[in-house]
Image (spheres, rainbow, N blue to C red):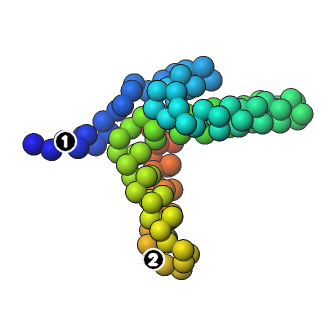
Amino acid sequence: MSTEPEHGAERIPRPERTPDALRVALARVAPHRLAEMEQQKNEAFALAAEHDTLGPQHGWLRLWAREVEVERRYDFSTRRRSALDTLHRTDDRTDPAFRAAMDELRAVEDEATRAVSE
């Protein structure tokens, strides 16, 4: 019997797409990223105020909904961690392993984006 989580298995349910819900979810699945989230939120809100537009805030919500999706799903987080490990071990950007890892990172992000956009 396998101890690996099933494809799409979730660590927590998908949160609502609000700043507070995303922050609570991130605190549960990747608390080490909370400072990064807060810094980017402050930057987005400052940019929104400077340019009198909600675009940066909407962008921040999209980005962090995707990031929480990756962190809360075993398949996404495992694939991303594996790709990042490969990138950290590969110094040569012309190495096929580097390109494959970059492609995998993009695929994970794209799949997570689609999942939270449904």
Q: In the image, what residue occupies the spot 48% across and 78% down?
A: 95
Residue 66 against residue 20 in the figure, above or below: below
Q: Secondary structure at mark 2?
A: helix
Q: CA distance from mark 1 to mark 2?
A: 31 Å
The secondary structure type at the circle numbered 1 is loop
Decide if residue 68 is in sight here.
Answer: no
* Residue at 49% from the left image edge and 35% from the top image edge: 30
Q: Position of residue 112 (x, y in %)?
A: 47, 42
Amino acid carrying mark 2 in the image: Pro
Q: Quadrant of the N terminus?
A: top left
**For mark 2, what is the residue?**
96
Residue 86 quadrant? bottom left
- The answer to which image quadrant residue 49 occupies is top right
The residue sitting at 46% across, 27% down in the picture is 28
Specify few, some or many for label 2: CA neighbours under 10 Å numbering under 14, 14-19, or 20 or more: few
The amino acid on which the numbered mark 1 sits, given as a three-letter code, is Thr
Label 1 or label 2, whichever lies nearer to me, is 1
Label 1, on which residue? Answer: 3
**Residue 99 disc label:** none
